[in-house]
Amino acid sequence: MGKAGADDGADPVSTGGPAEIRRRSVTIAGHRTSVSVENIFWSALKDIARAEGISVNRLVARIDESRTGNLSSAIRVFVMERLSEKRCASDTHQGADDSTRKA
């Protein structure tokens, strides 16, 4: 993988499905490392980084700062927590819309 791919969170086109595990290079505090995560988690991680206006490397560094275990696992947990928060916020908003219509 070239430097551009590592810096912007891009990865080569994959022929595997969402559950395919791929090793990806990231830079944390100036040090190169790799993480192995499923395509679906990597895609969600890139979406979260884009929504926050930061690079994937910066987001991974933030995850790394607060992790207690394996970085790949910490990324999966982070993504799941974010998706859960988003879903709960959507459900709460939907419930408010429903109660408004009933009134």
Image: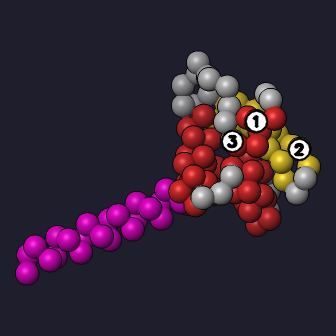
Three-letter code, disc 1: Ala
The N terminus sits in image quarter? top right
Q: Earlier in the sequence, mark 3 or mark 2?
A: 3
**Magenta segment, principal secondary structure?**
helix
Q: What numbered label is drawn on residue 9?
A: 3
Q: Secondary structure at mark 3?
A: loop
Q: Earlier in the sequence, mark 1 or mark 2?
A: 1
In the displayed structure, does residue 98 sit left or right of residue 87?
A: left
Q: Give the residue furthest to the bottom.
A: 103
Provide the residue designation for mark 2.
32
Relative depth, front residue between 58 and 97: 58
User: Which residues lie in the magenta part?
Assistant: 81-103
Q: Earlier in the sequence, mark 3 or mark 1?
A: 1
| Residue 82 x, y percent position in the rendering | 54, 60
Does residue 72 show up magenta in the picture? no
Q: Secondary structure at mark 2?
A: strand
| Residue 91 x, y percent position in the rendering | 32, 65
Please say if 47 is above or below 40. below
